[in-house]
Amino acid sequence: MLRAWLAVLLLAVGGSASAVERVVSLAPSLSEIVVELGSADLLVGVLDAGERPAALKDLPSVGRYGQLDMERLLSLKPDLLLLWPGSVGPAQHEQLKRLNIPTYVAEPHNLEQLTAQIEAIATQLGRPERGVSLAASLRQRLESLRQRYRREQPLRVFYQVWDRPLYTVGGGQIISDALEVCGARNVFADLTLPAPQVSVEAVLQRNPEVILASDQAQLEAWKAWPQVTAVAQGQLLLVTDKGLERPSGQMLEATAKLCQIIAPDR
């Protein structure tokens, strides 16, 4: 926080935190953060993966997730890259390093880290005061959610990403932290991979009190195991908001919706 305010002070007295003018974002979540910071005018290219924010619909594409068009990227002459490590393959990641283009790498593992990285991105863009303002608002919302949904004994939750094969999220994935904010605990929080494959037997053994999935058919399939507490108590809950998959400022409101699904009585 102190560093961000110092950057604001430097700008106020005529200094500059950055001379950035041409930014390429290599992840949809990072593109979204730039828009949230009111700095879409600095973007000259984005990596595509799903629907773009309206403010970016006419920007040049530098490829799709995992398939970066290096020639197109270079033609845009960026003076800053915003990179999510998993958005490009290892070989292209090494190529980017050799280009010596200033790069900010973001991979938050919890919502507090996300908020801090939004501040840092604003500073990279030369607009730190916007990061300070947005981060303060996000931290206030985060604390409000923690207070509202805190439990002495967190609910055991299985968060299903896919069913064939069966995937979930690990403890270092930011969705696990969103669950904690909601007074819950990922039953596979001990796994370190971001999206580990698990077995039905492992889920049965950990006996979640709530099962979350984005597809109703996937939830219905769990009714084959009525011994699971979540099934017995009818806690097979549908999560349709894709905002949890994009670590940007909007994820706080996506987390609020998640909390309402898990604990509507609060």
Image (tube, rainbow, N blue to C red):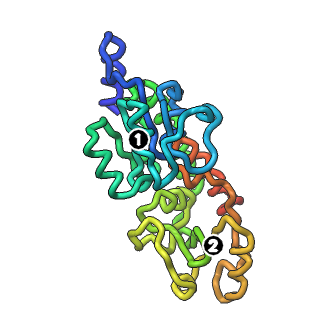
> Residue at point 41% right, 73% down?
190
Total labels drawn: 2
Whether residue 35 is situated above or below residue 108 in the rendered picture:
above
Q: Amino acid at mark 2?
A: Val
Against 44, is 72 above or below?
Answer: below
Image quarter in which the C terminus is found: bottom right
Residue 96 on image: x %, y %: 32, 45
**For residue 21, what is the image quadrant?**
top left
- The mark that comes first in sequence, 1 or 2, is 1
Percent from the top left, x then y, of residue 78? 38, 31
**Labelled pair 1, 2 in contact (Cβ < 8 Å):** no
Kindly identify the amino acid type of the residue bearing the numbered disc 1: Glu
Name the residue beneath numbered marker 2. 210
* Displayed quadrant of residue 245: bottom right
Residue 140 visible to an observer of this rendering: no
In the rendered structure, the answer to whether residue 37 lies left or right of residue 75 reads right
Q: Which residue is mark 1?
A: 71
The residue positioned 41% from the left and 41% from the top of the image is: 71
Mark 2 packing: few (<14 Cα in 10 Å), some, or many (20+)?
Answer: many
Element under disc 1? helix
Q: Quadrant of residue 19?
A: top left
